[in-house]
């Protein structure tokens, strides 16, 4: 089994496999947002058939090559069409595919690598054996098959009070089509938190990628002024909370929770099966997502650094990648 950068004539097959066995974040429609910095790696059987893939993002940082997930992309894969039915053969096939990816990534020559693997990856031993740090991270995933009343009952008492308080105070959460509202609140939030944000990527997501068939947004309004927002992308079965923000001047403890609740209800209306909060390991953020009652779900991150830049790993929190 081998891995290499796919050719343009293979995009259609890569896209089909990504949609069938990966997530929307592996598809060509999503990854084309990142231009030449995006690398699509195919996984090929020995006979040359494309059976899976992986995506990653490259940029120069402090004079060395930095490899990460593309911005605002929670999973880079890998995805794989495993044709075997025997448990041991399935495991060995997946490991062989991952080893092929690792071998090719090494050829890219990186100073620092930090990647979030898909939640479906339960075996990251090939990365561990290749000298990578393999670290568990977590998100919360809400099962949307429960009734709205049951979903609300499963939330923490604090989160329910947030929602109830917002309604009592006259805040209204509306589905919106004006992505400039989302952009303004998201960029303002990042600025207050002194976090860097690639505005070209935000523009790409909100202005080029976002369509009624793949995403939606809610804004919480107080006196007809938007004070909090949520932006969600989705495929055929999973909704992903991708972007959020709030207005500091009109800050209300329940506005964001109300917008999120309406986003969950919208996912239910669309017939989706799961709502992924794209959780965080930062305690206040983790606690906020936890309050919505989702199932704690682990996934792996892998990282590796060239020794002279090893110190960089200690200077940046993993959330920055």
Image (cartoon, rainbow, N blue to C red):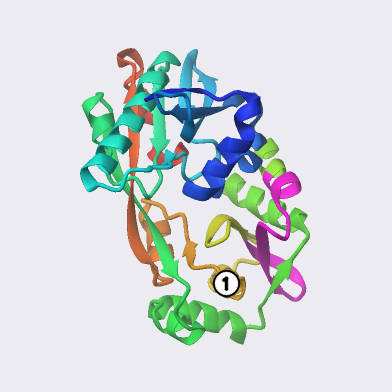
Q: Which of 118 and 90 is in front in this view?
A: 90
Instruction: Indicate the quadrant where residue 217 lies.
Output: bottom right
Q: Name the residue under label 1.
A: 271
**Residue in the foreground of this view, choosing between 233 and 252:** 233
- Identify whether 242 is placed above or below 58: below
Question: In percent of the image, x 67 and y 62: which residue is there?
Answer: 216
* Number of numbered discs visible in the structure rendering: 1
User: Depth check: 130 or 222 in front?
Assistant: 130
Q: Is residue 224 magenta-colored?
A: yes
Task: Please tell me whether residue 18 is drawn above or below residue 179 in the rendered image.
Answer: above
- Counting from the top left corner in percent of width and height, residue 189 is at 60, 52
> Along the horizontal axis of the image, is 72 left or right of 286?
right
Circle 1 crowding by C-alpha within 10 Å: few under 14, some 14–19, many from 20 = few
Query: Taking 207 as reference, is 260 left or right?
Result: left
Q: What stretch is highlighted in magenta?
A: 205-230
Q: Is residue 194 visible?
A: no
SS at circle 1:
loop
- Residue in the image at 58% along x and 69% along y: 267
Q: Quadrant of the N terminus?
A: top left
Q: Would you place residue 158 above or below residue 198 in this image?
A: below
The answer to whether residue 288 is left or right of residue 178 is left
Q: Is residue 208 visible?
A: yes
Q: In which quarter of the image is residue 27?
A: top right
Residue 245 horizontal/vertical position (percent):
60, 57
């Amino acid at each position: 089994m081998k891995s290499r950068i796919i050719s343009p004539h293979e995009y259609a097959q890569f896209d089909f496999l990504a949609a069938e066995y990966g997530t929307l974040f592996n598809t060509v429609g999503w990854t084309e947002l990142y231009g030449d910095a995006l690398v699509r790696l195919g996984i090929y059987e020995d006979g040359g058939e494309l059976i899976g893939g992986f995506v990653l993002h490259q940029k120069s940082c402090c004079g060395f090559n930095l490899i990460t997930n593309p911005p605002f992309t929670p999973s880079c894969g890998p995805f794989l069409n495993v044709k075997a039915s025997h448990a041991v053969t399935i495991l060995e096939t997946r490991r062989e595919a991952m080893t092929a990816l690792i071998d090719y990534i090494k050829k890219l020559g990186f100073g620092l690598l930090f990647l979030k693997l898909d939640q479906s990856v339960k075996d990251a031993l090939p990365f561990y054996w290749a000298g990578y740090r393999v670290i568990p991270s977590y998100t919360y995933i809400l099962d949307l098959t429960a009734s709205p009343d049951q979903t609300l009952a499963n939330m923490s008492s604090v989160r329910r009070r947030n929602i109830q308080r917002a309604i009592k105070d006259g805040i209204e959460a509306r589905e919106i089509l004006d992505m400039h509202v989302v952009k303004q609140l998201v960029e303002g939030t990042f600025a207050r938190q002194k976090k860097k944000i690639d505005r070209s990527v935000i523009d790409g997501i909100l202005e080029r990628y976002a369509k009624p068939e793949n995403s939606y947004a809610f804004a919480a309004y107080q006196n007809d002024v938007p004070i909090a927002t949520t932006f969600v992308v989705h495929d055929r079965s999973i909704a992903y909370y991708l972007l959020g923000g709030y207005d500091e001047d009109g800050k209300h403890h329940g506005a964001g929770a109300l917008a999120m609740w309406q986003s969950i209800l919208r996912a239910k209306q669309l017939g989706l099966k799961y709502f992924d909060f794209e959780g965080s390991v930062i305690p206040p953020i983790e606690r906020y997502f936890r309050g919505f009652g989702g199932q704690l779900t682990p996934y792996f991150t892998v990282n590796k650094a060239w020794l002279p830049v090893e110190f960089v790993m200690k200077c940046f929190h993993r959330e920055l990648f």
